[in-house]
Each structure stands twice: as C-alpha cells, then as structure tokens.
Image (cartoon, grey):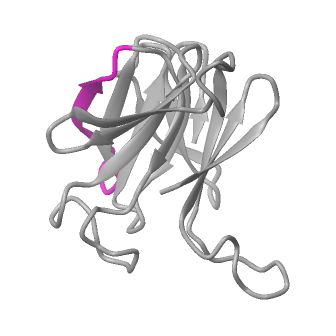
Amino acid sequence: LTAASDNTIKVWDLNTKACKATLSTHVGLPTSFAFDQAGSTMLSSGRDQLVNVWRCADWKLQSSIAVLEPVEGLAILQSSSSGGGGGGGANDAPLLFVSAGGESGLLRTWDLRSGRCVKKESVAATKAEAVPGLSRLLLMDGSGDDGDGVLFGRPTLLAVTTDHNLVFHDV
C-alpha cells in the first residue's frame, strides 16, 4: 500500500509490480492503515477525520466512520469475545479499533459496527502533564522473541508521541 498527496491509496502486487487498485475515497491525506487478523478487512484513516472500512477481496468500501479529528495512527484490536485467540472479527463480537489523533493526544477505541467511540484514554502519564500529540500506533500481540519467547505476555498497544516518547498501553 502507498498513500499519495492526491489523497489516494494504491494497492500494489509486489510480484508483478502492478497497481491492483486505487482507493480514492479520502478527501485528506491518508496517514495510516490497519488489517484484521484474517486479512479480509482493512481500515484506512487520514487527516480528513474519517476511518474507511475496506473489503480486501475486491477493495470495495464497506463503510466510513467520522472520528471528528485528524487520525495519525490506527490499529485493529481483537474482537472483544475472541479472548485473544484467532477467529474474532466482524461476525463475532464487535471488532474494535483504536485511533490516535495527532493533536489531542487521545487514544480512542471504536466499535466498528456502531461507529461509536467506546473508550478514550490520554497518553499523558499524569493529569498535570502536557498532552503530547501522537504520531504512530503499533499493536503487539503479546508474543515475540526476547530470549524467553514472550513480549510483555499480553497484547500491548505502543503509542509513539510527537515528542518521541514511547507509551505502552494494555489492550
């Protein structure tokens, strides 16, 4: 995937080096992409304050969610009933995703089906601390190899702030 200054997203076949699709629904710069575990759904977000939901099989737009702030980072969480094990997704419990607004410094968790924000969380360590902007999100699934085979032992969301701090959140 690539995002361009003309507000389009291009889907590329890395084997043939051909463009498979051009997604042109954003009216502001696309800034982030996230895929569900099955690879069947992609979310795209951008400075146009929208999160678009795409079906990967044919790259058709399924829905758009107005998040009412420019989005700099995006991550799809497991569905709330999947208990961390595979499956999950749009046909089980609601699929949740997190958006990170660049200026607000808030992580917002959204229910994909209803399009409603179900949780807000600041990246500031204390209420007195200035809220930094967010630049990126990374979802770590709790597995990894740091010598003992476990990275934190649980799903963790890493938020990277504009002042270059790394903030870890339990999912």
Q: Image point 25% across, 29% down: which residue?
A: 64
- As drawn, 156 above or below 142: above
Determine whether, in the image, residue 155 is placed left or right of residue 43. Answer: right
Residue at figure coordinates x 43%, y 35% from the top left: 44
Q: Position of residue 8 (x, y in %)?
A: 49, 23
- Image-based side of 29 in relation to 92, left or right: right
- Where is 17 relative to 140, above or below? above
Query: Which of 8 and 71 lies nearest the eye of the viewer?
Result: 71
Report the number of numbered marks. 0
- Measured as percent of width and height from the top left, residue 169 is found at 58, 50
Quadrant in which the N terminus appears: top right
Q: Would you identify the image quadrant in which residue 78 lies?
A: bottom left
Residue 57 counted in the magenta span: yes
Q: Quadrant of residue 112?
A: top left
Where residue 84 sits: x, y (%)?
40, 74
Q: Which residues are magenta?
A: 56-68
Residue 3 is situated, as x and y percent measured from the top left of the image, at: 58, 28
Q: Residue furthest bottom?
A: 148
Q: Is residue 67 magenta?
A: yes
From the viewer's perspective, is residue 132 above or below residue 145?
above
